[in-house]
Image (cartoon, rainbow, N blue to C red):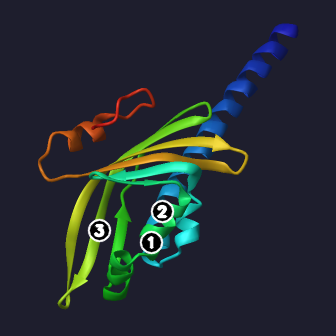
Amino acid sequence: MAEESTDLAERLAALEERLRRLEDQQEIARLIASYGPLVDSGSAEAVADRWEVDGTYEVDGWSMNGRAEIVAMVTGATHQGWIEGGCAHFLGPAHITVEGDEAVAVGHSLMVLHNGGEFVVRRATANRWRLRRGPAGWRVTRRTGRVLDGREESPRLLAALDPGAVEAE
């Protein structure tokens, strides 16, 4: 009887672990999916709240360090101009790997602009998100983006699926 009890306890622990991983992946997927609607609506504080206080958003040589710089990007003239003219950030499904309280998500994004009565893709980007679980849930510690324009580091960024992988430089 004790053996059955131990087996049941092990199975229950394994099930709880699997459920926790699925819940973590779902929370991270929702966090990433929220970026497009929030940034396209100009919700600067809500966008910045997806990052750790000292988190980094780096895309093609432009680095925003901390929430204040992310807010400044969203409220800045360039981004506000895109919103006024019509823009959409589409983030595809990400490959999410969770290891304890750290995670990495890798995927694509498209930025679409309304231009002269047409919608045009302004850029297609490879993204690597590093995330950490804290008291407020999952937050971005670093998002690295590289435009998919033929340069070598962009596909390397997409291949870096696990938390230990080195990001493209």
Name the kind of residue labelled 1 in the image. Val
114 lies above or below 58: below
User: Is 108 in front, or is 63?
Assistant: 63
- Whether residue 7 is visible, yes or no, is yes
Q: Are marks 2 and 1 in contact (CB under 8 Å)?
A: yes
> Residue 150, labelled with which disc?
none
Residue drawn at (50%, 71%) of the image: 38
> Which tag, 3 or 2, sits closer to the chain's start?
2
Instruction: Name the image quarter holding residue 73.
Output: bottom left
Q: Is residue 17 left or right of residue 90?
A: right
Marked residue nearer the N-terminal end (3 or 1): 1
Q: Which mark lies nearer to you, 3 or 1?
A: 1
Q: Position of residue 11 (x, y in %)?
A: 71, 23
In the image, taking residue 105 as reference, residue 59 lies left or right, namely left
Q: Residue 166 sits in which quadrant?
A: top left
Residue 74: numbered disc = 1
Crowd rating for badge 3 (residues with CA inside 10 Å; few <14, some 14–19, many 20+): some
Question: Which residue is found at the position 34% from the left and 35% from the top?
Answer: 167
Residue under pointer 3 = 111
Q: Residue at x 56, y 35 (%)?
A: 102
Mark 3 in CB contact with mark 2 (< 8 angstroms): no
Q: Identify residue for label 2.
A: 70
Residue at 75 percent across and 27 percent down: it is 12
The amino acid marked with disc number 3 is: Met
Q: Are marks 3 and 1 in contact (CB under 8 Å)?
A: no
Element type at mark 3: strand
Residue 65: image location, x then y, percent = 47, 52
Q: Quadrant of the C terminus?
A: top left
